[in-house]
Amino acid sequence: MKIVLVCDDELMNRKLASKILNKEGFSVVEAKNGQEAIDVLQSTKIDVSLMDLMMAVMDGYEATKIIKDDEKLSDIPLIVLSALSDTNSISKALACGADEYLAKPFNIIDFGARVKNALKNHSHE
């Protein structure tokens, strides 16, 4: 079973994403900030990482940059899920290394498809 990391400071967002992903056949690990996400990625085999941007302790931009700069973690597909949908936020997240950007609120079908596509694309590299 593929494992997805859901990193979001809002419990309801983590639970919603986890519920959708579980229905799609994924196992889910949760983190509530960027530092927790990095800790999980360093200790658990994660297949896809979903990252919020606006969080305390360490935001998603900084966490994404650290993850993508780490050669042991950089191959893990990372999708940003954020309520920020302006061009600057999207460009900054992609410049930090995000592989995909999905604005909240997201379409449930689109959400599942993006995670599956990230896995499929990653397996071909």
Image (spheres, rainbow, N blue to C red):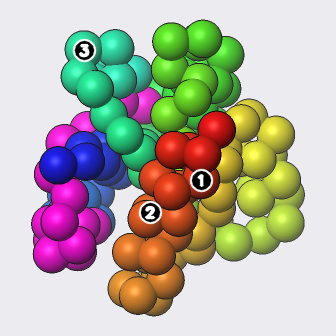
Q: Which mark is residue 121?
A: 1
Residue hosting label 3: 43
Visible residue check, residue 9? no
Confirm whether the magenta stretch covers residue 18.
yes
The residue segment tinted magenta is 16-37
Q: Position of residue 19 (x, y in %)?
A: 15, 71
Q: What's the amino acid at mark 1?
A: Asn
Q: Position of residue 34 (x, y in %)?
A: 42, 31
Q: What's the amino acid at mark 3?
A: Ser
Q: Secondary structure at mark 2?
A: helix
Q: Is residue 93 above or below residue 66?
A: below
Q: Secondary structure at mark 3?
A: helix
Residue nearest the observer in this picture, 59 or 43: 43
Task: Tell me what residue is drawn at x 82 percent, y 40 percent.
Answer: 95
Which label's residue is closer to the chain start, 1 or 3? 3
Q: What's the amino acid at mark 2?
A: Val
Task: Tell me what residue is drawn at x 24 percent, y 14 percent.
Answer: 43
Residue hosting label 2: 115
Q: Is residue 3 above or below residue 26?
A: above
Q: Which mark is residue 92?
A: none
- Left/right placement of residue 78 relative to residue 27 reads right
Q: Which one is in front in this view, the residue at disc 2 or the one at disc 1?
A: 1
Q: Is residue 41 above or below residue 47?
A: above
Task: Tell me what residue is drawn at x 59 percent, y 24 percent.
Answer: 74
- Left/right placement of residue 81 relative to residue 87 reads left
Give me the C-alpha separation between circle 3 and circle 2: 21 Å
Task: Tell me what residue is drawn at x 59 percent, y 53 percent.
Answer: 121
Residue nearest the observer in this picture, 70 or 54: 70
Confirm whether the magenta stretch covers residue 124.
no
Q: Is residue 40 above or below residue 47?
A: above
- Left/right placement of residue 114 relative to residue 62 reads left
Q: Secondary structure at mark 1?
A: helix
